[in-house]
Image (spheres, grey):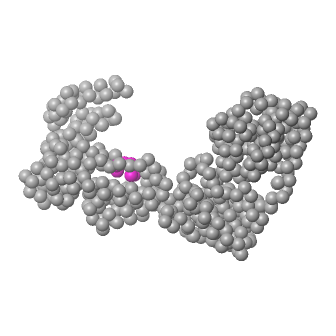
Amino acid sequence: MIKVLIVDDDKLVRKGISSAMPWDEFGMEVVGEASNGAKALDFLESNPVDLMLTDLAMPVMSGIELMRAARQIYPELHIVVLTLHQDFDYIQEALRLGAIDYIAKVQLEKEQFEHVLNRIHTRIGELTNTRRKLPQLGETNVHYRKVYALVSLKRKSGQIWPIESEPSVDEVRFEVERNSWMWAVPQGGEDQLFDRLKGYLDQVPQGALLVLSDVQERTWSQIQNWIINYTETSLFYAYEPQDPVIAVSINEEDTAPTEPRDEDMDRIKRSWFLSPWTHNDNYYNQLVEEFRSLRLQKGQLMGLLYSLVMEWNHLFAQTTLGRISMIHSFQSWYEVEQWIKQTAESIRKADEQTSYSQEMIDGVKKAVMIMQNDLDQAFTASGLSQQLNISRSYFSQCFKDIMGKTFNDYSRYIRMEKSKEYLLNTNNTIFWIAERVGYTDEKYFSRIFRELTGVLPSEYRQLGRADK
C-alpha cells in the first residue's frame, strides 16, 4: 500500500482530495494531512510516507522549501506538486527538485481523478522498475570487499543530509537508521566512493565515515546491525573530529562498554578529589586514562560526571575553590576530554585567587574528603593537620580562609546536613543517626542539632515529612 501525505494550506482542498479521489483502486492510502511545509516535515519525521502531494504557495514554509528539505532527508519519497495555476517557472523548479508529476487544481475535476491517480501510480511503478534492484537485507554479501558507513553522532532527527535521491547504477546503498547510511561498490569504484563520502563529512553534523572490512560472507542485515551497535557504543570513544575517518574490521573483538565495578568508581572519585590532577600533567593524564579505561556507556559516564560535579559543587561552590560547570550532554569521548581540560583550567584559576600554595589547597581538599567519607569518626583539626603533616595553627587558618568556616564549624555543619538526610529518608532512631554522624551522646547530638536548626531532630523529621 502506497502511503500518501497531502500538504495544502486550504483545508477544503485537503479534505476534497483526500475524500474524493479513488485511492484504494490504485493501492494508495491517505495517512495524513498538513497545512504547511513545517508541519509536513514534523509528520514525515514520525510517520512512514511513500508519496507526498504538496501545494507550492503556502505560509510558514513553501512547497519549494519543503521539497528541498524532504528530498535530502527522505530521498526515497515520491513528490507530486499541487498548483493553482500552471506557472511554468514554478513547475520547472519543482520538477528539477525531483517532483515526479504535477496536478493543476483548476483542471482537477471528478472525471479526471482516476486518470490523475493512474498517471501517478504508473510513474511510481516506472521509477521502481528502473531502479537497480538492491539486494535484500537477508542476502549474503559475496561481491563487496568493503562497506562504507556515513554516521552522525548527533542523533537529532530532521537533519539535512547530502544524499543523492538515487544511488548510482553500480552501488549498493541502505539507510541503516536515521542519520546513518551505508554503501558498497565493486572494488574498482571504492576510491571514488570513498572520496565522495569523505566530501560529505563537512555537511554532516559531527559526522564519521566508517570503512568496514571483513564484510564478505555476512548478510546485509548483519552488517547493518553491526553498524548500529558500533554507533551506539564504540564510536563514542573512537571518534576524533580532526580525523573522522575510522577503519575498522567487523571481526575485531567487541570493545563495547561494560558495567563498572564499585572499586573502579571509587578510584575515580578519589583521583578526582584527592590527587593534584588539575595542576600536575602526570596526574591529569592518569585521571583521563582511568575514565577512558572504564569504557562506560554514554549514560553511565554522564551519570558519573554529573555526580562528581554535584558533589564538588556541594562541597566547594561557596568557597574560594569555586563551582564546576557542566554541559548537558556529550556526543563523544573527545568532548569529555575537552570538558575535563576546561574544568582543570577553571579549578586552577580559582586556586590562583588564594594566597596559599597548591600543596596547602590540596591539603584542605583532602581534609574535607576525609571528613565527608568518615562522618562517624571524631576528627579534630589537630589530628588531621598531623595526618597531613601541616602545623595545626596554619592548617586551621588556611581551612577557615578557603572553606569559609572554622574547622569545628564545618565539622558540625556537614554532620548536621547528613543527619537531616537520615531523618527525612530513613526510619532509624535518633541514637542510630547520632552515631552515624560521629556523636555517641544522643542528648548532646540533639542539643547541637537544635542550636543549628532551631528544632529537635524528632521535630525536624515530623515537619519534613508533613511537607511531603
* Residue 245 x, y percent position in the rendering: 56, 67
Residue at the left extreme, as displayed: 393
- Side of 282 where 99 appears, left or right: right
- Magenta residues, as a range? 304-309
* Residue 352 x, y percent position in the rendering: 21, 56
Residue occupying image coordinates x 27% and y 65%? 280
Most frequent secondary structure within the magenta stretch: helix
In the rendered view, would you say 379 is above or below 209? above
In the rendered view, would you say 243 is above or below 367? below
Of 434 and 301, which appears nearest the observer? 301
Q: How many marks?
A: 0
In the rendered view, would you say 380 is above or below 221? above
Reply yes or no: does residue 137 show up in magenta: no
* Residue 339 x, y percent position in the rendering: 39, 56
Give the quarter of the figure containing the N terminus. top right
Residue occupying image coordinates x 37% and y 62%? 288
Which quadrant would residue 166 be assigned to in this image? Answer: bottom right
* Residue 430 x, y percent position in the rendering: 24, 33
Of 423 and 344, which appears nearest the observer? 344
Reply yes or no: does residue 306 show up in magenta: yes
Give the quarter of the figure containing the C terminus. top left
Q: Can residue 217 be seen? A: no
Residue occupying image coordinates x 62% and y 51%? 160
- Side of 368 where 338 appears, left or right: right
Q: Can residue 73 be seen? A: yes
Residue at the bottom extreme, as displayed: 188
